[in-house]
Every structure is written in C-alpha cells, then in structure tokens.
C-alpha cells in the first residue's frame, strides 16, 4: 500500500511538472501574471510529492519490504540500519528518485525565496526546471520504477553491494547529486535568459549563489568519493581517472569556470554569452555524468549500475536538453552583446584566462574519457585511456593557471599593471623556490614532486600576499590592518580561503601521488617490516564476525624508534549474502603522511599473510585543502550581496581592487 | 555584414560538436561488447607476475611465456562456458600439442579454482592467480573464457573469445600455432 502511494505521488508529480513547464512559460510570453504565478505553488507541490515518494521508498527499505524488486535486489534484513537507509539511493532506481528529489528541492527553494526576482525570469526559470523534471519522471516511470512489485516476494533480499556498505558511500551520492542537480538551477536561469534575450548584473547575482552552492556540494562529493576509494578499495590510491570519476570531475571543471565567469558578468557586464554557454555546458556534463554511469556506454572499474536500454532513454534526454539548449544558444546567443573592451592584463583578463584553462581541461578530460569509444567507433578496437594520458595532459595544462592564480586577484578591473603585482609577489617566489629546495632535499629530484611543491607554495604564499595587500599589512598600523581584516567582505574571505585550500590540496596530491612508499611482503606472526621509518610488527590474524560479514582481522603494532605509535587492524571481509570479499584498509593519519596497511591472502599454513604497507605522504593535507575550498565557497555564499537578493539594476561603481570577488 | 554572419556561425560550433558526440554515444549503446579487440594483437604480453593459486607451487610471469609458442587461457570456476571448453583443453594437454598457461580469474573463494581443477582435471602447464582482475584488465579481457596465442617472443598473435572447440582449433588456432612454430624454428636457424 505504501509503495502504491509512492508510485502515485511520483505519477502526480509528473503531471504537476507538465503544467509547471508550460503554463508559466506562456504566461511570461503574454505577460499574464496569473499564468506566471502558477510556477511557484507547482514547484512547491512537486517537491512535497517527491518527498512523499522518497519517504515511501525509505520506509520500504527500513522495514525490509521484500515485495519491492528494488528492495529485494539491494537490501537484506541483517544489514545495519544506516545502510538500509543509504540502500535507498545505493541502487539505480532509488538514486534516480534522489536525483528528482534534489531537483524539486532546488525548484521549491527558488519558488520560496525568489520573491525579488523579476517575475518573468522566475516563471521561465521554474518552467525550464520543470521541463528537466518531466524528462526524469518519465525516465523513472517508464524504465526504472522504484516501486515495482515482485510476485511472489522472496523471504530475504540479495543485500547491497558490500563495497557500498560504507559510511563514505552513504553520504557521497547525495552530496554529488546536490552538486550535479544544483547546476540545473544555473542552467534554468541561463535558458530563461536566452528566451528573454537579456543577461545583466542582476541575473549574474542570481545565478552565482546557485552555482556556488552546487559547486560546494560537488567539491565535497568528489572528495568523499575519492576518500572512499582511498580507504575502501585498498589500492592506496585516491584518484584513478576512471570514467565514473571523470564524469563528476568534468562538471566540476566547467562549474568552476562558470563560478568565475559569472563574476565578470556581475562586475563588468561582459562575457554574457560565454557565461550562458558555460551554464549549459556544466549542466550538460552533469547529465552526461549520469548517462555515462548509468548506461554502460563506457566500461568502468566501478560501474555498479549499467543497463543499455536505460542508456537509450538518457541519451534521448541528453539530446533534447543539451541539443535543444544549444540550438537556442545558437539562435539567441549572438543577441547577448556586451560592448566592453577587454585588456589582457586586468582582473577580468585573469578570470578569462582561468575560464580558458578550465574549459580546455574539461575538454581534455572529456576527450580522454570518450576516446576509447571514438576509436572503437572508427574500427580501432578497444583501448582504455588511463592515468598516463591525463597526467601528461591535465597537469601541464593546469600549471600556467596556477601560476597566474597568485597574481590574478591582485589585478584591478578594466586595466591593470603587472609590474607592481609581480613586485609584491617576491615573497611567494621566494617561498616557491624554498619549498622546491626542501622537497629536493627531503625526497630527491622527482620532477613532478619539485614542481608540485613549488606551485603549492607559490599559490599559498601568493594568496597570503594578496590578503596582506588587501588589509595593507605593514603599511598601516596593525590596528588598522586588523580593522580592515574584520571589514573584509565574506566573498573576499571565501576567495582567499578557497585559493589557499587549493594550494594545500595540491601539496597533498603531490605528496600522495609522487612520494608514496609501498612495500609488499609475506609476514609470519612476530615478523616485522619497516616502511618510511615505521616498523610494522605483524601479530597475526583473527577471525571476527560482523552483522552481515565474516572477516579476517590482522593486527600490526607500529613502532617508531622503539616507541609504540599505534595498532593497525586491516580486515579482509567476506559478505555472506553476495559471497563478495572486500578489503578494509587500516589507516593512521598523521600530519606528514598516512600509515596505511592492507592484508592480502594467507601464505602456507603457519599463519603467514601477504601484507601491503604504504606510507602516503600529506594525504591529510589533501582532505583539509578540499574542506577549506568548500568552506571558502560557503563563505562566499554567505556574502551580504546575495542575502539582500537581486539589487537594483543601477550599475554600481566599481570599487577597485578592494571590491569583492 | 559578412563579419556578423561569421560571428553567428561561431555560436553553432557547440551544437555541431555535441551532435558528433551524440553519434558516438549512439554507437556506444548499440555496439557488440563481444567483438574481439584487435589492439592487443601483435603487441607484447603485458608485463605480469602472477602468484600461484592455492596448493600449487608456482605461478607464472611474462618471462615464462618466452622461447615457446603458448596459449594463455582465462578461466574461472564460476564460468559456465569454461566448463564447456574444459574437456577440449584436456585433450590438448594429453596430446601435448601446445603448453597452456591458465589465468584463474576472480574466484570468490581461493579454494574454488583448485577444487574445480581437482574435480575436472588440470590442463594447464602453470596457473597464475588473478583475484583482483589485474591480469584480466591488462589483457583486455571482456569475459571468460578467452584464449590468447602467444609466439616465442612473447607477442600476442591471436585472441579467441568464448570456448575453444575442435572446429575453431582445426580451422583457426591450430594453423596459427603451426605457423608460429615454423617462425620460431626459422628464427633459431637464422641466429
């Protein structure tokens, strides 16, 4: 009964979305405020209906209602409660329901808090949002209904893929979807602007917070996924340039570009067509991400849900959404003129440079991800494009941007001079050289390592110089500097924190990627191995039972200079229902590196095991850096000018370098 | 006026690029995943060192495949089609035509592979264990069973997807093995 109610709510939401996608649009065209006003209650109603449907499915999972196909395939009575709940979106049907839940949530937020939006823009944006929703509702109802019954119901379920029974993966998909789907708002605003034929600073001020919000979630979501791969897959790596990972990274790159180009629209009334284009591209890449993961078009190491028949539907959806909006863009885009001249050395010049690099990087990742498919289409056979390609293209591509990133925020709008900026950056230059020397002294001359260390130091020091400049540190009494610091706009804080966070992330990625130490050996109980100065004493393996798995748990006593540091207990689990083994790495994070232990298979009969021990330098920095980036985004999001909402359309005087980003 | 239309054309580029991508996607959805890839053909065997399966003394590495013509066969106790081709592999072993190196792919339990071989017979010269699909990925395996023909220099010369049969052996793989043997003799004579 509950399942039928959920199914009914989903169907009802489809009809509401159909109304919301047409009536307000016609109303906006005819300037009929009654027709336009349909959008807001419809958006809120959609959200309520989907929330209800989602609650129904959650109840089915929690109570182990095995008359539902989805529950049978992905749950089991013995599964811990948190994974029964996360199981709701740990499968195809449920994850699509989560997708539309978030889509309708964003629509409802605009409906509720968009009172000071121009009514025409609001009506059109909500209509576009509803069009996307119609596509997804149809997709669910026609090809992947989460409320499908099974007759006769089995006594117990098939359990969730054990790799997914994990806290990181319980929160990873919702975060990622909040990011993906969040970009739908920027997309809807972009399409609405194309229909209206007008993009201005007020428009940018509306699009930017949505983009920021989506960006924060996507950044966090990608980091969570990476963290999960790091501790759960037991390979000691954190990023594999796997198609599924790339699928989430491409919208991130495009979204980051969008984030920066919308600043130019807001401050300089330029790059309008480009920003609209980026909004379309970012959401299209989010859809593409869904398409790639769900359809099996590309084979991936962790393709958990693949089904070609669904792929056809998503492809059709992609063609309608992206193809349709690109046609609209080709038709209306040239009308979005901006008569502003660009100086290459200026704040907007710097932001444009960021955009060029970010989009090129996104295109490179796209090419690398799709290349195997293209080659095969041309009769070239099957290949996989792996990390070497991406390391050889992506890393060099990012370097000039990272170099420029330290200087960019110090340039003024319109016309700037590079010389005084470079003069101020002597400190950053010194820091970069120093870090490269330190890295060379500590770790030897791996080129990527030296470059990474230098770039991280350069960007961090450059960002700090920029902060010092902003508060006139050392040039005015420190009391005055402190006062300036206190009065700095939130957005400026956000930029500083996020850029510093990226610098710290780069340091972490360099450490973990270049200076990793790995040791594989067979150890008998009592024997020990030394990795990076840490002595791991193997104390044998015990059998332990979990709620729905059996495990071999090894114990390592880790010592340094004879002192006990920590006891590590990596596990090898066998999930009984699916008869699938998983590896649980034991990790002890320290500021300078993670101690990481994984246990393999037994050797012989005397209790000896194959063990893999890693020292992964600076991994903690990577996570801290990403958290700072998200925090920076949140700071920027809380800036006063977004809370006030869309201000009047009079152009504000440009406040020089002190103006916030 | 001309410049303006040039600028308009610029706005159509994204659409054009997208349409090309759609064609590839449409292809990707309709392709047959069983088609044999040709990229590995005439390429050296990927560098591997495989651990032995449980109860067997030695696995094998890429170096073991040199100086002789060999078959590399991917199998698993969970794979029904492997069961189908198994009697024929036993025949090959009995007649000592060509050494077969097995890759025991993705056993859920380490005892499964050895138990399966114990029950039905072991046609392999040596067997490498591949629980984590390392070798399978390196070989570009799309499904078990798959059989690679490797020449005396360790270069892959042919790949067969699906169970081996008398017919396939007589018509395709047998002649290839013969030819590679002759090439090896020639190379020996030359040096």
Image (cartoon, helix red, strand yellow):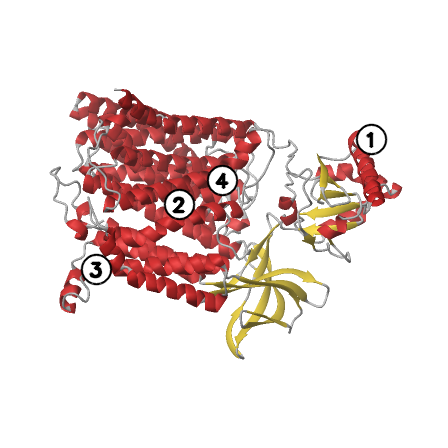
Q: Which residue is mark 4?
A: A368
Residue A642 x %, y %: 20, 45
| Marks 3, 2: nearer the viewer | 3
Pointer 3 indicates a residue of which chain? A
Can residue A171 be seen here?
no
Give the distance between the C-alpha atoms of the residues marked 3 and 2, in whole angstroms. Answer: 36 Å
The quarter of the picture where residue B16 lies is top left
Mark toward the start of the polypeptide (4 vs 3): 4
Host chain of mark 1:
B
- Residue hosting label 1: B170
Residues marked 3 and 2, same chain: yes
Earlier in the chain: of badge 3 and badge 2, it is: 2
Location of the N terminus of chain A by quadrant is: top left
State the image coordinates of residue B130 (x, y, percent, origin top left).
67, 50
**Residue closest to the eye, A460 or A512:** A460
Which of label 1 and label 4 is nearer to you?
Answer: 4
Question: How crowded is the residue under tag 1: few (<14 C-alpha within 10 Å), some, or many (20+)?
Answer: few
Instruction: Using the image, tell me which numbered label, if any, was put on residue A469.
Output: 3
What separation in Å lies between label 2 and label 1 (alpha carbons)? 54 Å
Q: Which mark is residue A176?
A: 2
């Amino acid at each position: 009964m509950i399942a039928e109610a959920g199914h009914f709510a989903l169907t009802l939401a489809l009809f509401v979305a159909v109304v919301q996608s047409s009536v307000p649009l016609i109303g906006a065209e005819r300037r009929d405020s009654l027709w336009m006003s349909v959008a807001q209650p419809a958006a809120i109603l959609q959200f309520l209906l989907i929330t209800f449907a989602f609650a129904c499915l959650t109840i089915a999972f929690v109570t182990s209602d095995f008359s539902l196909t989805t529950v049978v395939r992905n749950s089991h009575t013995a599964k811990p409660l948190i994974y029964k709940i996360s199981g709701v979106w740990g499968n195809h049907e449920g994850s699509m329901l989560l997708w539309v839940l978030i889509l309708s949530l964003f629509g409802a937020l605009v409906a509720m808090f968009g009172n000071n939006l121009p009514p025409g823009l609001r009506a059109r944006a909500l209509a576009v949002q509803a069009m996307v929703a119609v596509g997804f509702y149809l997709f669910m109802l026609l090809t992947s209904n989460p409320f499908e019954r099974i007759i006769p119901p089995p006594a117990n379920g098939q359990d969730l893929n054990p790799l997914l029974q994990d806290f990181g993966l319980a929160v990873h998909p919702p975060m990622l979807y909040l990011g993906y789907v969040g970009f739908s708002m920027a997309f809807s605003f972009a399409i609405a602007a194309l229909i209206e034929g007008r993009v201005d600073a007020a428009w940018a001020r509306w699009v930017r917070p949505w983009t920021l919000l989506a960006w924060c979630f996507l950044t966090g979501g990608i980091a969570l996924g990476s963290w999960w791969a790091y501790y759960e897959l037991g390979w000691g790596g954190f990023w594999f340039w796997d198609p599924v990972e790339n699928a989430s990274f491409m919208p991130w790159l495009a979204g980051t570009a969008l984030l920066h180009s919308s600043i130019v629209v807001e401050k300089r009334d330029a790059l309008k067509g480009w920003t609209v284009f980026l909004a379309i591209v970012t959401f299209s890449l989010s859809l593409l991400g869904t398409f790639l993961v769900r359809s099996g078009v590309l084979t991936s190491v962790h393709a958990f849900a693949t089904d070609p028949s669904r792929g056809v539907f998503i492809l059709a959806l992609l063609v309608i959404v992206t193809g349709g909006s690109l046609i609209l863009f080709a038709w209306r885009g040239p009308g979005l003129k901006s008569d502003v001249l660009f100086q290459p050395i200026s704040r907007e010049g710097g932001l444009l440079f960021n955009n060029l690099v970010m989009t090129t990087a996104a295109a490179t990742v796209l090419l690398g991800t799709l290349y195997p498919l293209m080659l095969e289409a041309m009769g070239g056979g099957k290949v996989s494009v792996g990390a070497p390609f991406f390391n050889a293209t992506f890393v060099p591509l990012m370097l000039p941007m990272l170099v420029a990133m330290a200087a960019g925020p110090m340039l003024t709008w319109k016309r700037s001079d590079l010389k005084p900026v470079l003069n101020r950056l002597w400190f950053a230059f010194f820091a970069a050289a120093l870090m490269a020397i330190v890295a060379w002294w500590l770790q030897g001359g791996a080129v990527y390592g030296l470059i990474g260390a230098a770039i991280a130091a350069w960007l961090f020091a450059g960002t700090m110089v920029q902060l010092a400049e902003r508060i006139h540190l050392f040039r005015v009494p420190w009391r005055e500097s402190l006062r300036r610091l206190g009065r700095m706009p939130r957005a400026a804080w956000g930029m500083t924190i996020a850029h510093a966070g990226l610098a710290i992330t780069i340091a972490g990625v360099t450490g973990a990627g270049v200076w990793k130490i790995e040791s594989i050996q067979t150890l008998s109980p009592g024997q020990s191995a030394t990795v990076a100065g840490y002595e791991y004493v193997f104390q044998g393996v015990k059998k332990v039972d979990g709620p729905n798995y059996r495990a071999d748990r090894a114990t390592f006593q880790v010592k340094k200079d004879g002192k006990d540091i920590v006891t590590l207990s990596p596990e090898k689990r066998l999930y009984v229902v699916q008869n699938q083994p998983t590896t649980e790495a034991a990790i002890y994070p320290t500021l300078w590196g993670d101690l990481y232990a994984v246990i393999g298979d037994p050797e012989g009969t005397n209790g000896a095991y194959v063990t893999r021990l890693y020292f992964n330098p600076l991994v903690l920095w990577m996570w801290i850096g990403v958290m700072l980036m998200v925090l920076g985004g949140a700071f920027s999001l809380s800036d006063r000018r977004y809370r006030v909402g869309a201000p009047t359309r009079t152009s504000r005087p440009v406040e020089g370098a002190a103006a916030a980003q | 006026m001309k410049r303006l239309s040039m600028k308009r054309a610029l706005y159509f580029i994204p659409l054009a690029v997208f349409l090309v991508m759609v064609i590839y996607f449409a292809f990707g959805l309709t392709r047959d995943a069983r088609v044999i890839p040709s990229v590995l053909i005439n390429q050296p065997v990927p560098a591997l060192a495989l651990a032995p399966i449980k109860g067997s003394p030695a696995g094998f590495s890429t170096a073991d495949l040199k100086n002789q013509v060999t078959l590399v066969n991917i199998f698993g106790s969970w794979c029904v089609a492997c069961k189908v081709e198994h009697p024929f592999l036993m025949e090959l072993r009995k007649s000592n035509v060509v050494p077969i190196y097995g890759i025991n792919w993705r056993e859920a339990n380490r005892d499964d592979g050895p138990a399966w071989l114990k029950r039905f017979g072991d046609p392999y010269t040596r067997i490498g264990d591949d629980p984590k699909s390392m070798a399978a990925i390196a070989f570009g395996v799309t499904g078990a069973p798959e059989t690679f023909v490797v020449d005396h220099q360790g270069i892959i010369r042919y790949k067969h997807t699906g169970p081996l049969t008398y017919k396939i052996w007589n018509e395709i793989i047998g002649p290839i093995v013969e030819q590679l043997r002759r090439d090896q003799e020639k190379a020996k004579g030359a040096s």
